Amino acid sequence: MDQFHFKVNLKGMIDLLSNHLYSTPQVFIRELIQNGVDAITARQKIEPDHKGEIGLELFAPNNAYPTLYIEDNGIGLTEEEVHHFLAQIGQTSKNKLDNEDYIGRFGVGLLSCFIVSDEIVLLTCSVKEDKTIEWRGKPDGSYTIKVLEQKMEPGTRIYLQSKQGFDSYFKVDQIQQMVRHYGEFLPYPIHFYGNESIRLNAEKTPWEMNSQEALQYGKQKMDIEYLDAIPLFSATGEAQGVAYVLPFSIRVNAKQRHRVYVKQMLLSEKIEGILPEWAFFVTSILNVNQLKPTASREEFSNDARLELVQKELGECIKRYLVQLTKTNPDLFEKIIQVHYESLKFLAKEDDELYALFIDWLPFTTSLGRLTVKEIRKHTNNILYTPNMDEFRQISQVAKSQSVCVINGAYVHDTELIGKLGSVFPELTVEQTNPSTFMYQFTDLSLEDRRKAFDFVELANLVLQPYHCTAEMRNYQPSDLPALYTTNEDALFMRTTEQTKEETNDLFSSIIGQLTSNKVKPNDAQLCFNFQNPTIQKVIQSNNRERNQLVIEILYVQALLLGNYPLKKQEFQLLNKGLISFIEQGIGE
Amino acid sequence: MVEKFEELLEQAYLAPRGKVKIGLLEEAIRIADTHLDIDAQFDARMELVDTAIFSGHGEKAIVAFAWCLAQYDKNPNMYNDHQMMWNYKWVTDRLLEFPDIELQKVKATLEDLKKRFTQTGHGPHFYYYIKQALAMQLEKTDEVQHYYEKWIREPSDSLSDCRACTLANQTKTLLYLDKLEEALAVAEPILKRRLSCHSVPHRTYADLLLPLLKANRKEEADDYYQKCYQLIYNQTGFMDTVVHLLTYATITDIPKAISLLEKYLPEAIDSDESAVRYQFYTVATVLWDLLDEETKKTVKLPDTNNMTQINEELVRLANLFNKQNKTDVFTKKIDRIQTEIRHLHQIKN
């Protein structure tokens, strides 16, 4: 079988690179510095005491496009290596065997220079041979190689002249800013030579700082007063860093972006998914040595190792928070106040953390927002409703009776409440709903029952068309004349009836069938309050017609108090009732 | 009240699809209906449509969508055509989960959908798909064949399902038509995990279990069973898929089947989607028959229902479906599926 090779169109490749692989043309700076760093690292393999340095300068003559100069005192290239590596796309001088020592993996780095320049000039001298080589490459793939007379120190120098339309990338402050951006924490000094030489990279990295310094750095860099700085470490990923606790709450599923360095070179400021999903309340600065960036180098390959790193980094945050509950409970409380949603998620997933956090976590209750600790002080008998509607029905009455009912309708809350008994064996946890809750209302005495009998009977008759039954109990608050309670099925019935009034015939009949084929749901209930002065007056009255009006109005009022949207016929009731009372009031 | 409304929407946004999220949205709708304007009422309902569709609560999606459609018809310029049609498509798809709705009404809805698609400049790709899906449910094989061909010949457009779903749906039809090899060829990008989405490859794995088993390719089927179960574990809205798993386990591995029954029967009973109950009960009752009396005692069933009641409900549903669809396939189907499971169970054990 014959074997052939594709002929690769270099110009096309470069177009592809510039348009797709790299999201911004500035990356050529990153690629140049990276080549320098790699060259120095390679030299240090042979000469461990070698002090590596990188330098840059910009020449901007008036009558020509500006030229960027960059030099390193790294290992350099021999003549053969120049032929071999620079001539072939995708080849790299970085030895494949120990490639984890280097930042780049693709060797296409230098090509990114063609995005901004029409010619790369490279002078190099290898520590392995005493020859100065000049290589000139063009974007069409052609290149020349010359051995120069002049001597140079081992290392590499690159000259890059801006091509038309790209000179905005060749400005002093631009270049400096880009070097700082990508190379702030690189291990070798990087200088910019101008009127005076300035060092562009930092002397200390955030992962070498203590918590105070890291917070200071965070404030200066991001202009945010973070609540705390948590040290991060992962052995698997050879990762180190700092997680900053955000001082404001974050939407739970908002993906946090992280500033990630690979071998101390900035990979991206917006890496997602390096920390576990629940850790959305921190943003981090991380240096990772053992994760593979994808070809665009703006995210990590999603593999088993990433998962492990994620887990290890998550552990750091967990352990830290656990420590904090003991060493600085005030700060922990502050963090909880801001990030309780995230911490609830954590507590739900992890029994150990649950036991540590649960007392501090806040819940919505009939008595307002309380932490579990406060709830426990109030009662040992925990009542909760799993849904919002039931909570609303109960909360008003519960409050006036000083009963604490927790609203479990929010994300994670029901699960968290359900596990309370595992940490506090003295607690009983019970789900309640409006009808069971109403059983706690006191029944009428036999005598009162006789007094209320006619009224309740009438109410049942009046409310029948609304799928609602009536009863009479004693309960607080006494200024509440009637309480409307319902169940899920009955509520869905209400919704369907309300929708049928609005929608077209086809859907109206479909909805009709949807509900008619179901087993009949329980009715809603209207529970009158025997303690209420108005009710007392009404049951003593024999005016059946007016009592009917009162029942109808109280029914509508109870619906409105409970935030139930009225159906058409209920609106009509309200109108009819009001008009009648007005007429009676003005004595017609 | 606006703050309360927004807080609820935000909370709902945070919640995974399922009951909690539905509850929060329903509360938001009640607040919008009593205190806020039509836009708020509309937006909250559209959220509910999306959530309910993917959480196994088609009935809530249908009701909420019907309300939105009415607003859209009153004021078409106020709303986004594509968004409306996109959701209409899902609602129609869910309608097939309710064979207790008269066939004539389901058909009328499909025609209405087709008309509206045309009016808003969309093609009939999805319409043909749903026609063949309906025919499949009613076991009208000629019609399945007819609409299947129309469907795959029609170019897809912005209202079509995603590529993964389209291939998964094709696979399902080919399996119904007994073309296993062709189905596997179509499903290749799914099985190789080159294409995936919210419900794929989950349902394709599930669809393939029985056909592979019958073709004496149990090893592959076992592998897909495992993968499928991992994907749907702890997710809501996958009861169709669960039924396939339960069927397969009933034939091949009774202890596994019992675990599935215990885990999912409460959800099936709780489901308002009548097709889900019907399918689940069909398999659950045959599984029950295969158990000896001693084992039956160890199975944890919901307090409120026993297997006799479930069998009665199954018969009631089948008769109701038959009546509403003017057919007898729904009673026959139970018989056929149960006989097949018994038969295969016997061979494999």
Image (spheres, coloured by chain):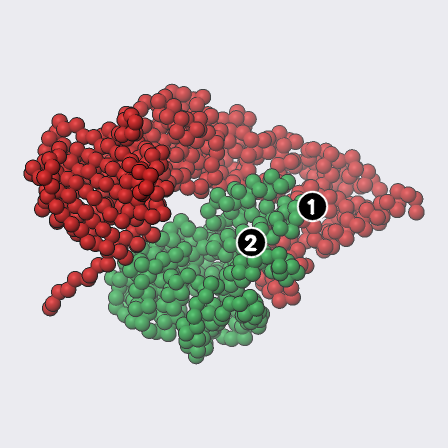
Work out whether residue A310 or residue B104 is closer to the camera in this orientation and state it.
A310
The residue located at (47%, 25%) in the rendering is A334
Q: Which amino acid, mark 2?
A: Met
Is A548 on the left or on the right of B290, as rendered?
Answer: right
The subunit carrying tag 2 is B
SS under mark 1: helix
Marking on residue B46: 2
Q: Colour of chain B?
A: green
User: Residue A484 location, x and y as percent?
Assistant: 67, 44
Work out whether residue A268 or residue A581 is closer to the camera in this orientation and state it.
A268
As measured in the structure, the alpha-carbon distance from the residue carrying label 1 to the one carrying label 2 is: 25 Å
Taking the view exactly as shown, the residue that stands out farthest to the left is A129
Between label 1 and label 2, give the one nearer the viewer.
2
User: Residue A450 location, x and y as percent?
Assistant: 77, 41
Q: In which quarter of the image is residue B237?
A: bottom left
Residue B53 visible within the image: yes
| Residue bearing mark 1 | A559
Chain identifier, red in the render = A
Work out whether residue B135 or residue A108 is closer to the camera in this orientation and state it.
A108
The residue located at (37%, 65%) in the rendering is B167
